[in-house]
Structure formats: structure tokens, C-alpha cells
Image: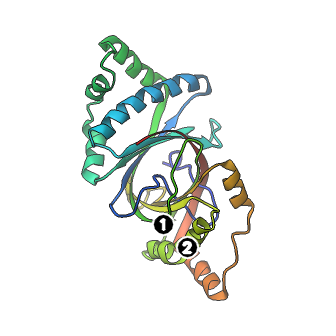
Amino acid sequence: MKTLLTLGLVILLNLGISAQTNTKQLYLLFEFMQVKSDQTSEYLKVEEFWSGIHKQRVSDKSILGWDLWSLTPSGKEQGSQYFTVTLFSSLENMLKATESLDVYAYAKKAYPNKTEKELTAMFDLTVKSRDLAHQVLFRQIDMTNGDFKMAVGTMLTMDVMKQLDDSYEKVESEIFKPWHQQMVTEGKKGSWELLQTILPSGSEAYGTHLTVSMFKDVAQLAAFMESNGGSWDLKTQLAVQQGLKSRNLRETKIARLEKMVR
């Protein structure tokens, strides 16, 4: 599972993936793709085809949206090169999608003018162009306030966290989130989210949470990474030092939004 959760990158934490409001529970299915360099163009054709299917799913209200992200760095020894995120309004809908999605029926609705032979060819190309390496199911449990809107070219950093004690989520929300909110308010980042892993789970799971920060473009991300993060008073510094003991930052990586469906 380490290959899958080879994500994340930023200072203390971060995770945003939807720029949605926090009024309703949001569920997210991450699917990590390993794509050989000589298959990149074919893979992108496949995802363009699938984006039409996802548009139909949004229209049918079975999903809220879908995103395609490219990972950086993306060397063949560094795990997955792409991942997709599908957004759901309920755990039930997400579980149904992982078990019994009738993709052919959606494809026929999305592409009524394509023949069965053409649709079958695209599904065959899907299998050949990439390896679906990992699936991870998440629940959004906290996020910053703001009006950030994702667009193609949006950058994100993801930190894979392993919870060490039960105080971790409280630490993120009460100690670190205000710092992220300040960065959002000052225009230094777009948003921040905290996601809790639903599956895989257990003591051997690589991570228990994901934090994601969104940035409008590479320039904003680079400026944030080169900044000192601001200053904290002594009380906050001590709280941060204690809070860092509640989790282990397993891994961090950067991603760029390549395509989105809403």
C-alpha cells in the first residue's frame, strides 16, 4: 500500500480535494494508476473517454464529481504516476461504485452513437494502458473555510499520516487548522482538508489519514514552499511540538489537476 499512498507534500499537513462546502459529509474514492511512459498518450485517451462516463454519472446523481491528477515526481520507481478522485455524497454510494458499477450501461448512455465494438475497444484499451494499483476510501472530516474553486492546473500537496494516538484528529482541527485557515485568508493557499481513511484499515495499514492543501497554480505553491510559514507564539509552539507526537508523517507528494467533471 505504500506505492499507493505515495502522496503528500507540505509543511505540517494538508489535504483538499474538492473545494466543496463543509455542510454535508463528503466521501472520496482515490484510485492510483501506474502508467508506463510509452502508454501515457493511450492512457490519457482512456481518461478522456471515461470523463464522458463520469459526466453521465454526475447527471444521474450517483456521484458528485470526478478528477484526474498527475503526480510529481513520477518516476517508474516512485509508484503511481496518476490518480483519480471520485466524490460521493454517501458511503453507500461509494461502496456500490466499488462493487457493482455497470460501466457498460453508463458508456452506452454517455456515447449513444458509438457501436458496441467501439465501446469494447475503449474498455480493452483501458486495461492495456494502465494498472489500477490501489484504491483507498476516505471520509472528509474537516476543512478550511473559503471560496476557492478548483480548475485545471490547480496544484495540491498530500501528506499521508499514520495516527499514533486518539488525539490526532483533535490536534489537526484545533492546532493546525487555524494556521491553514490563516494561510487561506492571506491568499497563500487555496484550501486545506483532513481526510480519514475508511479502507484499507487495521494496524498494518500504511496510513490512517490524509491532509491535502490546494494551490491555484505552481507559482502559489512555490511561494508557499519557500516561505517560513509565519511565526507562532510560545504557547502555540509548545502545542505544535506536542501535537506532532500524535502522528507520523509517512509520505508527501505533489499533484496537478489535469481534468475534472462536476
Residue located 38% across and 48% down the image:
87
Residues at marks 1 and 2, CA–CA distance in whole angstroms: 14 Å
Residue type, mark 2 in image: Phe
Q: Secondary structure at mark 2?
A: helix
In this view, 90 is above or below 194:
above
Residue at the disc numbered 2: 176
Residue type, mark 1 in image: Asn
Return the residue nearer the eye: 169 or 47: 47
Query: Which numbered dot is residue 94?
Result: none
Residue at the disc numbered 1: 145
Q: Position of residue 253 (x, y in %)?
A: 61, 51
Q: Position of residue 220 (x, y in %)?
A: 67, 55
Return the residue nearer the eye: 154 or 71: 154
Image-based side of 64 in relation to 163, left or right:
left
Q: Secondary structure at mark 1?
A: loop
Return the residue nearer the eye: 234 or 74: 234
* Precedes in sequence: disc 1 or disc 2: 1
Residue located 64% across and 49% down the image:
217
Residue located 40% across and 19% down the image:
122
Residue 245 can be seen, yes or no: no
Q: Position of residue 26 (x, y in %)?
A: 36, 56
